[in-house]
Amino acid sequence: MAIRMGQAAIDFAKGQVTNPTPPPGESDWFGWCLVFVRRCFNVGPMYGSAEKGYFGTDFKHGTSGTPPLGVPIWWTNGGDGHVAISTGDGNCYSTDIKRRGKVDKVAISYITRTWGQKYRGWSEDINGVRIYRPGQVVPPLPAVDLSNVIDAARRDQFRPQGQGLHEHDVLIVEKALRHQGLKKAEFVDGYAGTEFRTAYAIFQKATVPPPFDGIPGLASLTKLGKRNGFRVVS
């Protein structure tokens, strides 16, 4: 599982404002703040509430100063508590605060003032995974060449299975489609044939205007990258 850090985690959070992907079986993010934030970092489950998640962190920072970009920020209330993700400018992305079950960008102080919970500051870790170190250099996101993926989507269907063009770029896109629930593991093979185009067309229908032809465009591939931790170059 590739951990998202820094701007990549923020990009995922921002995407949830307009294109939410709540937990399976749920219609929105209501009551799922810890799941939302850990999914921003692509971190697995551990605790049953944000309050337990806060007390389980090992690298806590207090409430002085502004939390850096891309870290979890915590509140406790003797119950479930709350967690959000800092944008580094005194704001954060949070569930439920402006719209029930939705994600919005708000001031950290607004949550403290509105909900009356005790603001605890921020941590470098969440659910046992350290996602931030002061002074760290966050590695760049993997790059996908748009022209390579378009070329493969147009030509691989006419090539033998297993001999796809631009396998490196196609594999990154296929793994993202699998993460979106649109591809099975056995079809993640670097080959952008009919099955690839069918899966990608479904993603297009959910995110961009027509055509839904399964050939990636800049808008759709950028959206897929923001949700799954890669950047698009052309």
Image (cartoon, helix red, strand yellow):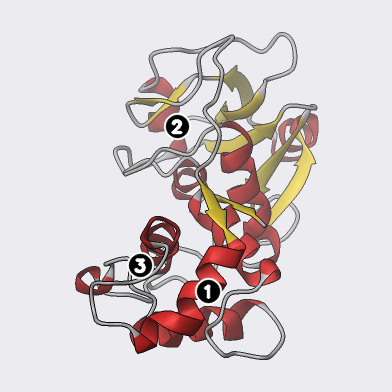
- From the image, tell me which residue sits under label 3: 178
Looking at the picture, which amino acid does disc 1 mark?
Answer: Asp
Count of marks, rendered view: 3
Q: Which residue, given by chain and number where applicable, does mark 2 sit on?
A: 51
Mark 1 residue crowding within 10 angstroms, few (<14) / some (14–19) / many (20+):
some
For disc 3, the neighbor class at 10 Å (few under 14, some 14 to 19, many from 20) is: some
Residue 113 versus residue 184: which sits nearer the camera?
184
Question: Which residue matches tag 1?
Answer: 151
Which tag, 1 or 3, sits closer to the chain's start? 1
Quadrant, the C terminus: bottom right
Q: Residue at x 41, y 38 (%)?
A: 3
Earlier in the chain: of badge 2 and badge 3, it is 2
For the point 46% across and 74% down, the residue is 152
1 vs 3, front mark: 1
Q: Is residue 208 left or right of residue 35?
A: right
**Whether residue 196 is visible:** yes
User: Which residue is situated farthest in the left direction here?
Assistant: 186
